Image (tube, coloured by chain):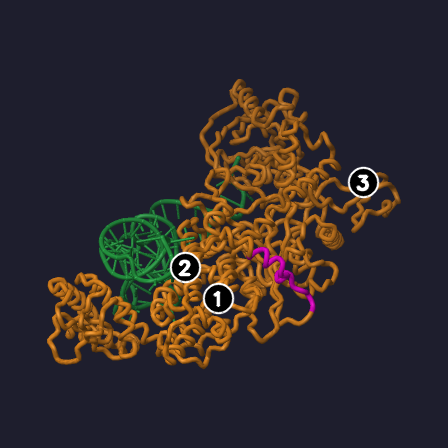
Amino acid sequence: MSERIKELEDRTRFEPGEVEPRILERWLASGLFHPEPEGEASENYSIAIPPPNVTGSLHMGHALNGSVQDTLIRYHRMKSGAKSPPTRTKWILGTDHAGIATQAQVEKALRAEGRSRQEIGREAFVARVWEWREHYGHTIVEQFKRLGASCDYSEERFTLDDAYARAVAKVFVTLYEKGWIYRDRYIVNWDPGSRSAISDLEVEERHETDTLYSIRYDLQGGGSVTIATVRPETLLGDTAVAVHPEDERYRDIVGRTAILPLVGRHLPIIADDYVKMDFGTGQLKVTPAHDPNDFEIGIRHDLDQVSVIGEDGRMTAEAGERFAGLTAMQAREAVVAELEREGRIVAREEYEHEVPYSHRSGERIEPLISLQWFMSMEELASPAVAAVREGRVRIVPDNHRRVYLDWMENIRPWCISRQLWWGHRLPVYYCETCGHVNVALSTPDGCGECGGHLRQEEDVLDTWFSSALWPFATLGWPEQTPELTAFYPTNVLSTARDILFLWVARMIMMGIELTGQVPFSDVYIHSVIQAPDGRRMSKWLGTGIDPLDEIERHGADAVRFGLLAMSSTQDVRYSAEKVQQGQALANKLFNAARFALTRIGASLGEAQAAAVEPASLPRTVEDRWILSRLARIEADTATRIESYDFSHAALGIYDFVYGELCDWYVEMVKHRLPDRAEHLQGGAAESAAQQEDREALAATLLYVLRETVAVAHPLIPFVTEELWSYLDDGGGLLAGARYPSNVGPSNGGEALDLEAEAVLQRTIEAVTLLRGWRDSVGARAGLTIPVRLSAEGYEATAPLLARLARLDLSAAVAGGDTPVASIPIPGGTVDVLSGDGVDLGAAKRRRESAAQKLLAEIERVEGKLERPGFVEKAPAAVVEGERERLERLRAELAAL
RNA sequence: GGGCGAUUAGCUCAGCUGGGAGAGCGCCGCCUCGACAAGGCGGAGGUCACUGGUUCGAGCCCAGUAUCGCCCACCA
């Protein structure tokens, strides 16, 4: 026995804390995660990681998505089979500069020093953010390593790398030249928190209760109108009052003039069918500069735009002297107070409605008019709609398909400029002389029109603009690099659904437009993990669970297994039990392998060699059974991984390892292994037959363990890699090994042994029954209970059965003694022939309760068969099955 | 307002094209069985949210109701 295996004897537990760093180091040193883009390969397989925020840290969503992607990557890396060239497998890694989020962090740090970005200026600020990124930017990458993620760490990308920035500029220029990117004065979602415009998708609606004020405006020449608003302060910017064109009540006031209270401005009364007749009085104040709907009305009716709230969220000079400088909320109070004094507030009532907030800063959105850059989306969207419709991009699960299509078909222009400093500055240069707008890949020497001096646009692009290029810009696009050729388009994009529009849809649009190909063929939308109580997992609510703490406590394999096992096609609550289950699995597998290896002992070397081609070895029925079950789990796991059913892949492996490999197979073959004491002493005398059986068993056991760790490796890579170093004497890594056999959804069938499965199935049922009976009659191990087994198919397994049920069959009597007790087992009975050690009363009670159960079941089946129409209308196979069952039940009852 | 999803054991969830209600954890009982107590064996526990329908037969299909969750949406 080798020294290493002797060491293994003392490791009674799998210790992730000790093993994981050691295994990780070997993986990283191996170069396995970095595929060469050229040379022979049977297939290419690639995934681009959703780039985490550069200064972020690993949360549960990352951990789940990392587990999903790594399972796919590791599975494909191993998949191609021993004889074909390997699959070239790449997991593209990188981080996102995350404009607003990162800038906000650094600004916060500056504030803590008592400074602001305005104080230090743009250049110094950006330098500061780069420093910040140097300092914190690798945290999350290191955390992905702890999870065991087999990303290509040698080529980490960043969305602000020079090469990446060139791709961004190239896209901007291309789309500008097509006329799809343009500059416009338009009402935008202004985020006073980050002092920037944001896109519609970055706005979240919150349900709030406000006061709805009804305010009376006088009409010139007598009469009045009453408008309703929750934002009285915007009244200062009113430029019209609108009614519905078909509203009989107000037909005669259209065209007249209202006087704006507090200001005195003359407001035309206009008719527009946006106005709802049944809301309030049916009279609407129109504030084009501060409400998106009013803005549209303003365009239709050529109304003035009076901006009374500025970009700082405070009232402007246009709001009038007494309000200028107040915050919007202060202005509201002041306006209401004045209106009150004038007696213009007709009513106030509580009003529940949706209020827009910035998803980023959490501040309330202030809609206002601003000069921004936009991208028109219709032309980009339609091929992206077609790609999904035609299945060139498959969305899994497919209920998200319609959501995607609905959104894409009603897509609106995208505001792509941000008033930030951290990001891709727009490649736009304004001429200070003639005002000409120059758009160019690199800074021009002078204005294209007049040669005048140029000033670059201050704004940066929305972070999602650069993220939209991720699958190809990371591979060197627009250059035709070998990487781009080999790995683009990618195979899968895995993400949570919250960024389906924000990111996934835009990647599909940009990918098709710029490369002519869809960026990935599958989109896998994974679960959102909620807190155990069903609330959102968030640091803010204190409901967050840190995956790194969990890894620390239970090991990376356990966390990966747990997350995959709990994931589903919908949101799920975090399940600590599933993680525990994963930890138990790793430990169980470790101990089973440890047991087998230490007990195989002397013949380990030959067994390792034999395990490669085990086809011709002598086999017992349980050996044949486990090989058949192994073929099944291999095929099932492959199918499940390929169909993104990670939960069943994980739980299936658990069931196999516990329910088949350990609880039954290892228990069944224990007695065939040499005694530990013997082989530690160098081996006792054994017969030739015993030796042959032991060697065959050793080879089988090793083969089964090897295949098992290979199947499980994509999900729980650490423990399986550790075991591989004992199970395989080649010195290679499991992560780089290939399944020797049975891999792929279609290959399982031939390896199945249905006969062995059937025999073992019945043996297991029989043992279960006997164990129950043994317990119920108070029998104990070591007692000799003479029994007679009369059941077909048990000749081969009878000794096994007796041993597992801990009954001694050695005193079995063949003759015609009258049994004192009979236990029904599948296909026959076990007769107890004497009362030694048996509580006959209990045996009788047990017999009676068994009979009762059988009778009830018989009644149920009879009823079903007699039900009118059943025999005529049910499928023949179902009817036949029921009849067989009835017969079997009756036979069992008779045996009692 | 529109859409999607959920409701099955004490808890978290499986349940494939309709045909004998399941797992993990928890609970109860037994077990130092020569890998594993992070273990082994056995057991209790369910009106499958509710109402109606289709069907020989419904946890599963259809209609409706209730509760919860998420997404989208310009009624001030």
Label 2: how many residues lie within 10 Å, few (<14), some (14-19) or many (20+)?
some
The disc, 3 or 1, on the residue closer to the chain's N-terminal end is 3
Q: Residue at x 58, y 76 (%)?
A: A83
Q: Is residue A290 above or below residue A440?
A: above
Q: Which residue is mark 2?
A: A588
What are the residue bounds of the magenta stretch? A23-38
The disc, 1 or 2, on the residue closer to the chain's N-terminal end is 2
Q: Which residue is mark 3?
A: A455
Q: Residue at x 23, y 78 (%)?
A: A791
Report how many numbered discs are placed on residues in the image.
Answer: 3
- Residue A317 drawn at (x, y percent): 68, 25
| Chain that is coloured orange in the picture | A
Does the segment drawn in magenta span residue A26?
yes
Q: Is residue A428 left or right of residue A860?
A: right
Disc 1 from disc 2: Cα separation: 15 Å
- Residue A855 drawn at (x, y percent): 16, 68
| Chain that is coloured green in the picture | B
- Residue A423 drawn at (x, y percent): 69, 44
Q: Secondary structure at mark 1?
A: helix
Q: Secondary structure at mark 3?
A: strand
Q: Residue at x 41, y 63 (%)?
A: A595
